[in-house]
């Protein structure tokens, strides 16, 4: 018994020793690591901090793949399709549709916070705030210049984001610190700031950015393209111009304050940029065209640039523009980007005058004697438009009808729906091998020309027509328009005529660069009608016709006579080759006269079977309701954050009327 | 932290001491020593048999080899008893060696059931525990074990598994919830031979090894549905499945072999339009979309006539019935000190599509050895290896047209494409005497462009892809070593200690190869009268030399690539347990305490090469260019530490009690929140053993009431959410200067951490009744459960009131609560009519419901929005949709005429006027904006009020707001019936499933209209859709997708379903046939799986009851021939 007991105790002791000794330590658990992620000591490494900054650029701009796309982060081309530049009915201009409920408002503001990070505006702002708060503390060991430049870029990006929120929604909550999620913390339940407060914050950020950013980056080979001091100042000028415009400025016509501020900012930016080597590129339209193709290297015209790259990998940002504008016959994937007749009839004549019948303009042989920029902006049947595989290719997009009413198409361009097609910013050496999908053409988001036009607009609104003409003259002089009669502009009767002249010049110079919608919006050009509480009426004041009630018109270019067969092109290849006009040829205008004769001999213009602007096949005219200028907040935002007020003109989530006035 | 540990260890100590001090009071005495071996009727040695000296408390149990030694008074009688066996009494008659053979007792109550870290007798079970006999699964021709469990256990549901070779299904026990975004899992915890199965890449439960097991290597499967799973504590909220694999039985070597030869074919394919029907449909669709469409864009009358003769059925060409085989053999046997089991299974499945092939090998060897007195070793080595070789046709992955392409998606899209390819399109054509694969030309109104494309169907040709060497081959290997040492402490009867170590090492290698292929494309098929291949000039186009040629030869290189994937994982687990089991007269006591530590480690690497050329040779050097953003190398590690224990007590097998506990640590949480504590208590009362009961209710053979309550947890969070990290992403950092346009590394913050995150907690209650009557022939089991889950890891940042303007994302916090309850019933009848004729019927029925008790306040939404809200249930909500407006000319809600639209608009206008608003049909504000062929819906409500109610009808049709209840609940009621019949060697087994309730709709698939969208050959009911040429069509026009596709009563169908899931017929060849051989047994049988539906509510029976129109792969019906032989 005793022996047994002793044994027993040994066993117990042994067992417990094993149990306690071997198991009761969870140290091995704490040794477990997470591989592949850094904690916030990454701020101590310049390389990692740089990667953080570069990721911010990525989040802001990776979706920017077409010059007509706008709004940082999302970069959609929907807005650009609301003006005369491009056909195709959109909800916001469809007379059969009314968007007034919160559910129909823009979702750009963002959705509720969750457990996964979404690349939405306020997340981008948060990540800017994050670096601004932490870098000087956690990254104190880093070189000060590096830290300042990193901060400068964050201030710049934050301001850019607030600007796009402002022009979408008017006032939005201003967040400049990193906040933690809480459902019941009144301190972070910020109301929509007034537009003036938002602008003040944006200006402050751009000023900070300007003070911290370099004029040009050292090691341009790896840094060119980052935002600069000049870019910050130019963006500030753009913001102040928007703020001075009638949409946000009910006293635009009576008070000079905001126009003065915008002008001052514009001139400051111009001075800074000029000093830093920026300016207008070239002295003729060919150089103007080629300027857009400067790739990954300094272009004096490009105040800000979006880099795109060729190649078919996930690392590359491809530009989708070349694919969108090339037609089937050139190896593209569709009908190209047809230019509505309204755009064709818009560009000046060669001497700068407006294209009216009185001035000798014929809208069938529309290509004769136009502004040099016309031929660099549009292509049409009979004009050279090269690509890598065919350096002498010419565009032909007519159709023919045979005796049995069967239809054939020149060069397989079966979906061509206009007599002219957008070719601006095209690369004549692009390959059609993959439907032009992998284009690396960079996008100039803010050109020096735009800055000059912004300044011209301020001068115009201030009634300084002389200065207006001087700035417009610089734009036209550069593309080779003769200086006579103020480059064809003539005299400007008053400030309204001056403003109209500037807006006209913007439509031409900046066509298809994603700017037109925002000009129409700033000046409220769809109609004189406004929402109650909002001052408008600018359309009449500027002597314009409202856009509402117009449409974007497409046409067929059709062979005049009955063709022998739908299968065979009634015009021979040799006949076509004889009349091709080359914009780079010295006798280009003479070639165009020949081509015009060819048009008159062979073609007629016929209406499309289904209109460019149609709804369920029936033609419709543009109707843009006044509440669309500034979107309401989406139902998600309003129901999620019930303290946010809805914008006037929009219903809140419960059908009540919005009260937030963006002109106050 | 350390304090807590000391407490825990002290508790263990205390428990131990209690057990020990009890042990010290025992007394032993001696007279004569008897030894012997106990075997079963097949000669297998039986461990664990109770050997008792009659009329005394003197009892021993047989060891692992069925041997016993007992000291008794001479002239005594020995009583042998063992669960599942008939009790046997043997007088000594002067012998000192008494060996005996026990025969099986069909009374299942005596069966042994494997539970967590131990075993129990079925009659003494106090939890909701179900067992599955692997023998019942042997015949089923399924590729993975989960599939075989369908319909067998009430409360256990099996879902998913597309049926493609190598795809597995998933299992869920009762109701499982989790509000954590990526960390949640509803898969039950699987334990194979004490090793907890977790995914080494994320620590979540996995069915990977479980699905690979072959029924022939399994001893038993136990399903722990209630708090019985609490012994697995932190990871057992979803229930647990405990598997014990086979070990040897002493005796002569027994060899058995069984083989299965099966044929797989689709239950059926959806009925789709033929070429002519497609042409008519396409014209009707396009004309409805654009009433004044150019005639060049439509199929002409002559073309339609020609299409009547075209019959290019892509699927028929590609699909074939496939063969599946399984061979398994095993051998077991052993001597006095050592027993063994060895088995191997080979399974091979051919493909119905392409050359897909799935092979798997399983092997298992198990050994029990007595290596010293009282010390026994049990070890097993097992492994699986599998090879999946399949067609790789990812060229289609980027086609997103909202239609069949999007519905199936990715690599799984080929079936949908083949089935829905318009049948006027051939896959091959001859040009200049040579065969070429064709770039599909499914549209009459547009040309999809280049065949060198990955975002349109023009770049896809299944047969070209199949025959150019593109494929994906995966090899996986897994080896498991499992060893335990059991030491019986001789001095203290019933006390033993056990150490277990298990380790699984697995690796997976996948090579994905996609090579370029050539297609010929008709360059002008969108033009007048050129929509069919016959119109194309059969020569290659050349601007100068052959301008009338209509074909272009293009090479699709767009997705050419080679990916090499490699993954290696290690999981280890060590356990230490002390067991105590003793019977003292009427008191039976069991106790166990143990500790467990586990670690996981995984590495994954991938080399992604792109732009591979046709002459790829199999090596990286010939694979193209390396894509850095798709290449990766990553590492994951994690660990757990646990303590657990159990105390059983039973008095006369009448009053039963059990206490379980477990304490777990998980590295998913911050160190101060590592630990969770999960106790459980179970009580049982076998009322039928009470004298007063048996006296008055003698017809009741057995009646037990049992109750369990326990706490389980769930660490359903992604690891490392308690600390702020920043991720490096190789392709998300912009580059500048010369590198502009090509991205490099970016650093981006992960979600904001929550250092306080800890376990979800579930308290599980289960009340159960077991009831046997009519001589145990009828047994009835009922279980009622109530699970309260609290502290659930919830996305709090989505609550209303959290400003959107803060940005970022936040880790889950412990907040929400859900109560879930339900009932499960099973009724089994088995009887023998004659000595050799028997039959059994089992019916399973279960009911489940739940209520969200606590959830962050969400933004106000319409009542029809079934999003998670307090007071509502998850999964059992009303089914909502529009009610069609019956005022149309045909009364069915289809707007067919101008008058219909005018009348409908008047209806809306009247209501709008009354409400002071303007009429609207979705966002359309004019009658002229509505197209014929749309559906008219009733206006039943207005705008949403701030309190979540809806305003009065306002003449505006809005989704959600104007929905009505189409069914009060989505709940489906159903029961499963298992039938068995045996007569003279013949047997029959079948499972019939019946369900009703909820809501069933015609499944609608969109026809995309974007420039890249192809026109598809849709399901046949669309042949009768409204069109200008078919004004009385039964269905609205598909072109009005946004106006017809919302859920509505128009598409609602009867919900009744009854189907025969499987059926087995077999024959045991009488022994006399092979009486002179060593053969012990031969069985032949035929089994069918996924058999017949008795009712199909779909119009024109366009689809079967298993697969919807957009299914990525059809459900397979399998018929197999089974052959078993044993020696």
Image (cartoon, rainbow, N blue to C red):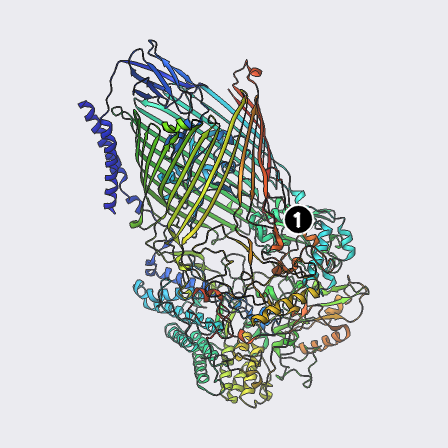
**Residue B939 found in image quarter:** bottom right
B881 lies above or below A517: above
Residue B557 in view (yes/no): no
In this figure, which residue is indicated by the disc labeled 1?
Answer: B1099
- Of the pair B1105 and A160, the residue shown nearer to us: B1105
Side of B981 where B1025 appears, left or right: right
In the rendered picture of this protein, how many numbered marks are placed on residues? Answer: 1
**Residue B479 point in image, percent of width and height:** 43, 35
**Farthest residue, direction left:** A2
B195 lies above or below B1023: above
**Residue B440 point in image, percent of width and height:** 67, 52
**Residue B793 point in image, percent of width and height:** 38, 52
Side of B792 where B923 appears, left or right: right
**Residue B345 point in image, percent of width and height:** 50, 30
Q: Residues within 10 Å of mark 1 (few under 14, many from 20)?
A: few
Disc 1 element: helix
**Residue B72 found in image quarter:** top left
- Residue depicted at x 39% and y 66%: A128
**Farthest residue, direction top:** B94
A195 lies above or below A78: below
């Amino acid at each position: 018994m005793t022996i047994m007991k002793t044994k027993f105790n040994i066993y117990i002791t042994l067992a417990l020793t094993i149990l306690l000794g071997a198991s009761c330590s969870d140290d091995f658990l704490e040794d477990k690591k997470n591989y592949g992620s850094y904690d916030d000591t990454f701020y101590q490494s310049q390389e990692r901090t740089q990667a953080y900054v570069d990721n911010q650029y990525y989040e802001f701009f990776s979706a920017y793949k077409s010059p007509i796309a706008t709004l940082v982060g999302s970069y959609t081309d929907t807005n650009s399709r609301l003006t005369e530049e491009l056909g195709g009915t959109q909800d916001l201009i469809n007379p059969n549709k009314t968007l007034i409920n919160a559910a129909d408002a823009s979702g750009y503001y963002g959705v509720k916070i969750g457990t996964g990070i979404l690349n939405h505006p306020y997340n981008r702002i948060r990540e800017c705030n994050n670096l601004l708060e932490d870098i000087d503390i956690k990254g104190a060991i880093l070189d000060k210049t590096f830290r300042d430049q990193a901060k400068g870029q964050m201030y710049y990006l934050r301001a850019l984001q607030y600007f796009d929120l402002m022009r979408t929604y008017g006032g939005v909550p201003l967040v400049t610190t990193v906040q933690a999620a809480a459902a019941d913390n009144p301190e972070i339940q910020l109301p929509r700031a007034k537009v003036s407060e938002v602008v003040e914050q944006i200006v402050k950020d751009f000023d900070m950015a300007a003070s911290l950013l370099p004029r040009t980056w050292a090691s341009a080979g790896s840094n060119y393209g980052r935002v600069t001091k000049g870019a910050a100042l130019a963006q500030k000028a753009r913001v102040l111009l928007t703020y001075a415009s009638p949409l946000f400025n009910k006293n635009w016509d009576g008070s000079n304050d905001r126009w003065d501020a915008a002008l001052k900012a514009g001139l400051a930016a111009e001075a800074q940029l000029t000093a830093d080597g920026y300016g207008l590129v070239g002295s003729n339209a060919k150089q103007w065209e080629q300027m857009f193709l400067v790739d990954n290297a300094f272009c004096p015209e490009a105040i800000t640039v979006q880099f795109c790259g060729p190649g078919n990998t996930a690392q590359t940002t491809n530009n989708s523009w070349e694919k969108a504008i090339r037609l089937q016959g050139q190896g593209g994937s569709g009908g190209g980007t047809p230019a509505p007749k309204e755009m064709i009839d818009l560009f000046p004549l060669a001497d700068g005058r407006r294209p009216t019948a009185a001035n000798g303009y014929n809208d069938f042989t529309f290509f004769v004697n136009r502004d040099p920029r016309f031929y660099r902006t549009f292509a049409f049947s009979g004009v050279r438009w090269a690509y890598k595989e065919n350096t002498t290719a010419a565009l032909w997009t007519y159709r023919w009808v045979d005796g049995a009413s069967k239809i054939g198409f020149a060069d397989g361009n079966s979906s061509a729906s206009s007599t002219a097609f957008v070719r601006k910013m095209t690369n004549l050496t692009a390959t059609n091998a993959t439907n032009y999908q992998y284009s690396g053409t960079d996008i100039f988001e803010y050109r020096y020309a735009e800055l000059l036009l912004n300044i011209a607009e301020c001068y115009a609104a201030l009634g300084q027509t002389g200065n207006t003409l001087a700035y417009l003259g610089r734009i036209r002089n550069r593309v080779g328009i003769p200086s006579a009669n103020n480059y064809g502009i003539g005299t400007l009767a008053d400030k309204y005529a001056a403003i109209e002249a500037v807006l006209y010049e913007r439509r031409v110079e900046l066509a298809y660069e994603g700017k037109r919608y925002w000009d129409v919006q700033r000046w409220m050009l769809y109609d004189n009608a406004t929402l109650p509480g909002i001052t408008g009426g600018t359309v009449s004041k500027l002597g314009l016709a409202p856009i509402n009630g117009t449409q974007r018109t497409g046409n067929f270019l059709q062979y005049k006579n009955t063709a022998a067969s739908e299968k065979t092109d009634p015009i021979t290849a040799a006949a076509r080759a004889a009349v091709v006009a080359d914009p780079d040829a010295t006798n280009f205008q003479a070639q165009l006269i020949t081509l015009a004769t060819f048009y008159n001999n062979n073609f007629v213009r016929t209406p499309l079977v289904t209109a460019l602007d149609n709804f369920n096949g029936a033609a419709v005219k543009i109707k843009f309701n006044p509440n669309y200028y500034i979107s309401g907040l989406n139902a998600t935002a309003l129901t999620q954050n019930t303290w946010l007020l809805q914008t006037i003109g929009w219903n809140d989530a419960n059908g009540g009327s919005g009260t937030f006035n963006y002109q106050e | 932290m350390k304090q807590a540990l000391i407490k825990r260890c002290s508790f263990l100590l205390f428990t131990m001491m209690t057990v020990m001090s009890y042990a010290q009071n025992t007394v032993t005495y001696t007279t004569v020593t008897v030894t012997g071996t106990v075997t079963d009727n097949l000669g297998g040695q039986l461990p664990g048999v109770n050997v008792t000296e009659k009329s005394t408390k003197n009892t021993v149990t047989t060891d692992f080899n069925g041997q016993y030694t007992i000291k008794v008074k001479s002239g005594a009688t020995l009583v042998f008893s063992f669960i599942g066996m008939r009790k046997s009494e043997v007088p000594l008659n002067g012998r000192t060696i008494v060996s005996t053979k026990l025969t099986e007792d069909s009374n299942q109550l005596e069966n042994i059931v494997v539970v967590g870290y131990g075993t129990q007798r079925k009659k003494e079970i106090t939890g909701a525990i179900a067992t599955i006999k692997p023998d019942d699964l042997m015949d089923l021709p399924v590729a993975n074990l989960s599939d075989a469990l369908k319909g067998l256990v009430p409360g256990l549901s099996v879902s998913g598994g597309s049926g493609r070779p190598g795809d597995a299904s998933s299992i869920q026990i009762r109701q499982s919830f989790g509000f954590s975004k990526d960390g949640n899992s509803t898969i039950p915890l699987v334990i194979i031979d004490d090793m907890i199965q977790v995914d080494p890449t994320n620590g979540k439960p996995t069915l990977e090894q479980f699905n690979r097991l072959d029924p022939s290597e399994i001893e038993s499967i136990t399903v722990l549905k209630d708090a019985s799973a609490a012994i697995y504590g932190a990871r057992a909220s979803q229930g647990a499945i405990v598997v014990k694999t086979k070990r040897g039985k002493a005796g002569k070597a027994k060899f058995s072999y069984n083989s299965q030869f099966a044929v797989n074919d689709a239950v059926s394919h959806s009925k789709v339009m033929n070429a002519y029907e497609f042409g008519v449909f396409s014209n009707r669709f396009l004309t409805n979309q654009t009433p004044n469409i150019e005639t060049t864009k439509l199929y002409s009358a002559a073309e339609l006539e020609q299409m009547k003769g075209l019959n290019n059925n892509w699927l028929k060409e590609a699909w074939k019935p496939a063969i599946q085989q399984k061979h398994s053999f095993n051998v077991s046997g052993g001597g006095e000190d050592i027993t063994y089991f060895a088995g191997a299974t080979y399974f091979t499945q051919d493909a119905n599509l392409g050359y897909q092939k799935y092979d798997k090998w399983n092997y298992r060897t198990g050994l029990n050895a007595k290596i010293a007195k009282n010390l026994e070793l049990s070890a097993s080595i097992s492994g699986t290896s599998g090879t999946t070789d399949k067609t790789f046709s990812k060229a289609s992955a980027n086609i997103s047209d909202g239609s069949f392409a999007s519905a199936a998606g990715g690599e799984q899209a080929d079936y949908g494409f083949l089935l829905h390819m318009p049948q006027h399109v051939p896959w091959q054509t001859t040009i200049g005497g040579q065969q070429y694969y064709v770039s599909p030309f499914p549209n009459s109104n547009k040309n999809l462009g280049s065949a060198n494309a990955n975002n349109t169907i023009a770049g896809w040709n299944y047969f070209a892809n199949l025959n150019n060497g593109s494929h994906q081959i995966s090899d996986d290997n897994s080896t498991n070593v499992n060893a335990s040492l059991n030491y019986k402490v001789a001095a203290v009867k019933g006390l033993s200690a056990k150490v277990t170590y298990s380790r699984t090492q697995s690796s997976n290698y996948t090579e994905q190869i996609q090579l370029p292929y050539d297609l010929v494309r008709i360059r002008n098929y969108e033009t007048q009268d050129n929509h069919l291949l016959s119109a194309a000039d059969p020569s290659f186009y050349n601007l100068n030399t052959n301008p009338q040629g209509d074909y272009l030869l293009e090479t699709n290189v767009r997705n050419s690539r080679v990916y090499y994937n490699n993954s290696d994982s290690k999981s280890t687990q060590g356990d230490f347990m002390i067991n105590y089991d003793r019977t003292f007269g009427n008191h039976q006591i069991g106790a166990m305490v143990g500790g467990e530590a586990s670690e996981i480690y995984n590495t994954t690497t991938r080399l992604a090469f792109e732009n591979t050329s046709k002459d790829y040779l199999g090596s990286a050097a010939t694979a193209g260019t390396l894509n850095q953003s798709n290449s990766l190398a990553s590492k994951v590690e994690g660990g757990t530490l646990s303590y657990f224990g159990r105390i059983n007590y039973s008095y006369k097998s009448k009053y039963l009690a059990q206490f379980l506990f477990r304490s777990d640590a998980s590295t998913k949480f911050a160190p101060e929140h590592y630990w969770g504590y999960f106790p459980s208590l179970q009580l049982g009362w076998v009322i039928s053993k009470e004298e007063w009961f048996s006296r008055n209710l003698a017809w009741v053979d057995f009646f037990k009431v049992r109750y369990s309550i326990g706490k389980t947890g769930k660490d359903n969070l992604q690891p490392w959410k308690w600390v702020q990290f920043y991720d490096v992403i190789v392709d998300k950092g912009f580059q500048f200067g010369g590198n502009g346009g090509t991205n490099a590394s970016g650093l981006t913050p992960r979600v904001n951490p929550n250092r306080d995150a800890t376990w979800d907690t579930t308290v599980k209650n289960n009340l159960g009744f077991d009831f046997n009557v009519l001589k145990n022939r009828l047994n009835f089991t009922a279980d009622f459960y109530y699970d309260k889950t609290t502290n659930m890891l919830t996305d709090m940042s989505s609550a209303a009131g959290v400003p959107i303007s803060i940005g970022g994302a936040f880790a889950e916090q412990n907040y929400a609560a859900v109560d879930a309850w339900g009932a499960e019933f099973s009724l089994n009848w088995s009887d023998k009519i004659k000595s050799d004729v028997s039959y059994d019927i089992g019916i399973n029925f279960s009911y489940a419901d739940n209520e969200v008790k606590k959830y962050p306040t969400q933004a106000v939404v319409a009542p029809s929005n079934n999003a998670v809200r307090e007071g509502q249930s998850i999964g059992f909500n009303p089914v909502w949709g529009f009610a069609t407006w019956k005022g149309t000319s045909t009364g069915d809600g289809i707007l067919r005429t101008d008058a219909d639209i005018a009348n409908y608009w008047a209806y809306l206008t009247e209501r709008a006027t009354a409400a002071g608003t303007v009429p609207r049909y979705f966002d359309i504000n004019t009658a002229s904006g509505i197209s014929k062929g749309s559906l008219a819906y009733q206006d039943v409500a207005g705008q949403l009020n701030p309190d979540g109610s809806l305003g009065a009808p306002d003449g505006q049709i809005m989704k959600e707001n104007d929905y009505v209840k189409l069914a009060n609940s989505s709940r489906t009621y159903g029961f499963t019936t298992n039938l068995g019949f045996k007569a003279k060697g013949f047997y029959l087994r079948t499972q019939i499933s019946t369900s009703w309730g909820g809501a069933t709709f015609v499944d609608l698939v969109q026809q995309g209209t974007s420039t890249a969208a192809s026109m598809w050959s849709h399901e046949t009911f669309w042949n009768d859709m409204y069109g200008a040429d078919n004004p009385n069509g039964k269905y609205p026009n598909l072109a009005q997708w946004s106006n017809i596709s919302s859920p509505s009563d128009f598409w609602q169908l009867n919900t009744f379903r009854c189907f025969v899931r499987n059926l087995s017929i077999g024959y045991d060849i009488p022994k006399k046939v092979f009486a002179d051989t060593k053969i012990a047994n031969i069985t032949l049988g035929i089994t069918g799986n996924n058999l017949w539906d008795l009712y199909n509510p779909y119009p024109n029976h366009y689809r079967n009851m298993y697969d919807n129109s957009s299914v990525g792969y059809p459900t397979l019906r399998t018929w197999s021939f089974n052959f078993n032989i044993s020696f």
